[in-house]
Amino acid sequence: MLDFFRRYQVLTLSLIVLVGIINVVPTVIPTVYVLLVLAFFTFKKEIPSFLILFYCVLLFSDSRQEIMWWARDAKIVATLFLPINLFAVKNEIKFSSRFTVYLIPFLIIAWITVFYAFEPIMSLQKTLAYTLVVICVPALFLYCYQKDKKILLDIMYSFSTIFIVGILLIYLAPGFVMLEANGRFTGLLGNPNGMGIFITVTFLYYQAVSRSKLIQIDRREKIIFFVVLFYSLFLCKSRTAMMTVIIFYSLNAVYNYSHFFGWIAFALIAYMWSEILEAIPLVTDYFGFSEDLRVESVEKIKRGSGRDIAWMYAWQNIQENIFLGHGLSSTEELFRRHIKELSILGHQGNAHNTFLTLWYDTGLHGLVAFVIGLLAYFLKIGKHLTYGMPILFAILFSISYESWLTASLNPYTSVFFVLVALLGFVAIDYPVIQEQKEEEVKEEELDLKSKLKPQFT
């Protein structure tokens, strides 16, 4: 990990300066400062440093702390640097994200819904941002891997650093990372559920990197990553994140044995979900963790964060116009307009379901296009990777309880697109590269033999 900070000296120094000034200068200063640093990395074609800093801006923008609000404006402009970076290296890119092709029908439908959105300007901005992230982030990631495969570890080190800093702040500035109301850990994220989603996507990213064997991960680094990740999971008490971890490990064990039994196992989990919920309090009571993990009763789990209210409200509004959407970000606007009556009913936040959000925002056509694209892509890579489908099922579970995949400029969606780009590369492109290398080696051996043959005759 020390090598990581040595190789990213400019980035590390820039972040240290940023942390030093955000609490003592007007918010416009850190905004301009970050954009200048991003522009510098763009000019120098330092794509890895650019991507990590860009991600840090997304992370900071999710914070509930007032001193981080500058990042909410900075990330909008920072997103416009993505196509500039991609254009600068487009002739050098050998690999592209195959998942982007699968999402083209969905993106077309999303752009069409802009014309009859509640807030056309806002929907236009959200759709543009989503399109740029879908196209640019995975492509730039693959470019970085093409130049130096250490980017795989660099991203993991960045995640570990985020976890470590959050944990250290428990002792240095507890009010910054802990909610006073319930003592749950938020880390550098905006809320405990956000921390749970961050844990989900980083955990799955690690699984993909580790199992792909594209690069060797040091045993000590593995231990550090898992310790800070699972300690953060325990502190934030995110039930959804806990279940995604369990689902991945369980289904991965089955898929290693048989893909057919893997599908059966997932169907059983979906069918017996209510029974699984009822078993959670029994297990946690047995180990004495019920109070820590917020599983005092089954009904409390089912009502968590007013999700049943959110789902019912979203579904009621979807039925008014099932086929035509209202533009990306419309669900967010809908819940914002009716925040008072929903709060009285016990709901906080958005629709808490990616599928319902997609349905309301882009209509049934958009939802179907997104789901078909996602399933078709994973079915293709699942033929080659035993851990591909377990990752998909873990993601499906997470987005069934949160709407994070419908937004582009949060700290989770970009990791997801990096993850799926990595899976596609490992499943499809990497075997071709290996075959080409083997053929080149054979050709070199034949050339060597042909040169040596006359000497023996």
Image (cartoon, helix red, strand yellow):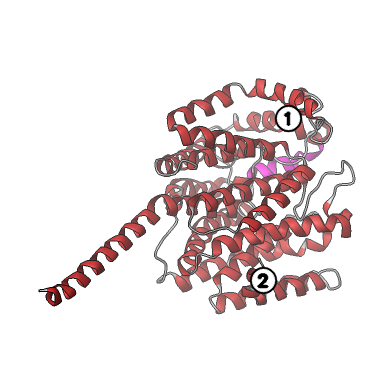
Q: Position of residue 355 (x, y in %)?
A: 58, 37
Principal secondary structure, stretch drawn in magenta? helix
Q: Which residue is mark 2?
A: 5
At a point 41% along the width and 71% down the height, the residue shown is 92
| Tag in front: 2 or 1 | 2
Residues marked 2 and 1 touching at CB (< 8 Å): no
At a point 14% along the width and 72% down the height, the residue shown is 453
Q: Is residue 355 visible?
A: no
Dot 2 falls on a residue whose secondary structure is helix
Q: Along the line of sight, which residue is nearer the eye, 43 or 47?
A: 47
Would you say 259 lies left or right of 62 here?
left
Q: Which residue is mark 1?
A: 309
Q: Which residues are magenta?
A: 330-340
Q: Along the line of sight, which residue is nearer the eye, 26 or 431?
A: 431
Q: Position of residue 158 (x, y in %)?
A: 66, 61
Q: Residues within 10 Å of mark 2 (few under 14, many from 20)?
A: some
Q: Which image quadrant for residue 440? A: bottom left
